[in-house]
Amino acid sequence: MLKVLASTWALLLGLMLLMLGNGMQGTLLGIRGAIENFSTTQMSVVMSCYFIGFLFGSRMAPEMIRRVGHVRVFAALGSMISAVLILYAAAPHWIAWALMRVLIGFSFSGVYITAESWLNNASTNETRGQALSLYLIVQMIGIIAAQVLLNMADPSGYILFVIPSVLVSLAFTPILLSVSPAPAFDTTKPLSFRALYQASPLGCVGMFLLGGIFSAQFGMASVWGTQAGLNVRDLSIFVASIYVGGLVLQFPIGWFSDRMDRRKLILALAIAGTVVLAVPVLTDAPFWLLIVVGALMGGISNPLYSLLLAYVNDYLDSSDMAAASAGLIFINGVGAISGPIVTGWMMGAIGPSGFFLFMALIFGVLALYAAWRMTQRRSTPEASGTYTAMSPTASVISVEAALERSETDSPPH
């Protein structure tokens, strides 16, 4: 692990600074939107637009990289992110924010693809698993630390928009100065959605539903907090708890994933998610209980992403894994676009508890579908790949590497 860290520290440092900037702007907009008197519906559109941009970026960035190269794409998109982070405060209108969120989602998607391809290229087959684990840890640390930075200044001013802009600008310094040459870049033609669904219906439906859950967490947690009357300190603690839970529970769930029928684990986690998220809907939960709910919510949904990837991998030939990664990312992204919109509608209809109710219902649908699928297909007692911890923000580069690594690490069967 230390050897991998020594060879990739500049990339990982840059990626952590990027996550600091992205984590700050996601939460800050929800707080500032309330200050600007934006409605819940307006903020749900703003938050959804990030995932629209991210989805387009995942499709278009590879072609941009092939045409003009990694360095130019990286620098151009990084400059776009830094500029948009400043412009949020200069143009406090929800339509302007929605358009800027499309731009910033597009740009972050391209930046992740570029940085992850460098990280993947810097790793060997023997160290790629450790590099992916370090990448996940760095991402989570960046988002968690970003919540601490939100308490450094008044959210009604400019400083909290300047800080992430500076962090993102600094993120490119260690990456661009230490990584040379840029890796060759190529992408595999995606597997058709029909073929992907036929290979794993539960994997495809699960990835779609999980996209909505993740985007609700990432985009609407701060909107929920302001509507629920939390101050900046308490809101930042709640958001941080989601990612702490996601980081802590990744590895124990991964251990179980490689030792039991993955469908049973998916079903158990979906049921657990439904029960946990029903608590703040049905009760007037105190703040300490909300922290526990947030940690369990993140601790269930983040590992579920990696678990579904591993499950899909069980039904793929090694030659199809790279092609499947792009399709799975796209399915997850389509689901993510709807998450903030539906959550905002529910919060507008029934109040803050709509935030938790939306995710409880989605987990419930996933549990029912998983239970039904278990009656339609026999289990795979010998999994064809191992569980690899991944973040839902990962690009197709990391997902492809994770799928390939899980096949390499799996026992012969």
Image (cartoon, rainbow, N blue to C red):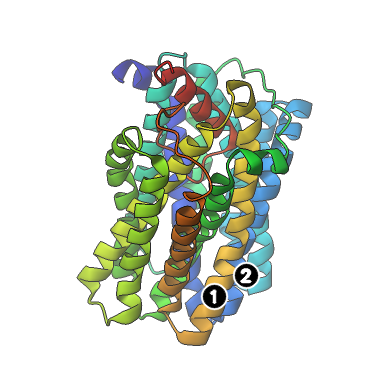
Is residue 231 visible to us here?
Answer: no
- Residue tagged 2: 45
The residue tagged with tag 2: helix, strand or loop? helix
Q: Residue at x 39, y 18 (%)?
A: 411
**Image position of 343 with respect to 200: above or below:** below
Image coordinates for residue 145, horizontal then vertical, percent: 34, 50
Q: 395 or 157, which lies in front?
A: 395
How packed is label 1: few (under 14 Cα within 10 Å), some, or many (20 or more)? many
**Image position of 244 with respect to 96: above or below:** above
Image coordinates for residue 162, horizontal then vertical, percent: 49, 56
**Image position of 287 with respect to 273: above or below:** below
Image coordinates for residue 36, horizontal then vertical, percent: 53, 79
Disc 2 from disc 1: Cα separation: 8 Å
188 left or right, relative to 203: right
The residue tagged with tag 1: helix, strand or loop? helix
Q: 66 or 386, which lies in front?
A: 386
Asked whether the beta carbons under mark 2 and mark 1 sit within 8 Å of each other, the answer is: yes
- Residue tagged 1: 344
Q: Residue at x 36, y 53 (%)?
A: 269
The C terminus sits in image quarter = top left
Image coordinates for residue 27, horizontal then vertical, percent: 44, 62
Which three-letter amino acid code belongs to the residue tagged 1? Answer: Gly
Which three-letter amino acid code belongs to the residue tagged 2? Answer: Val
18 left or right, relative to 101: left
The N terminus sits in image quarter = top left
Q: Who comes first in sequence, dot 2 or dot 1?
A: 2
Q: 195 or 140, which lies in front?
A: 195
Quarter holding residue 3: top left
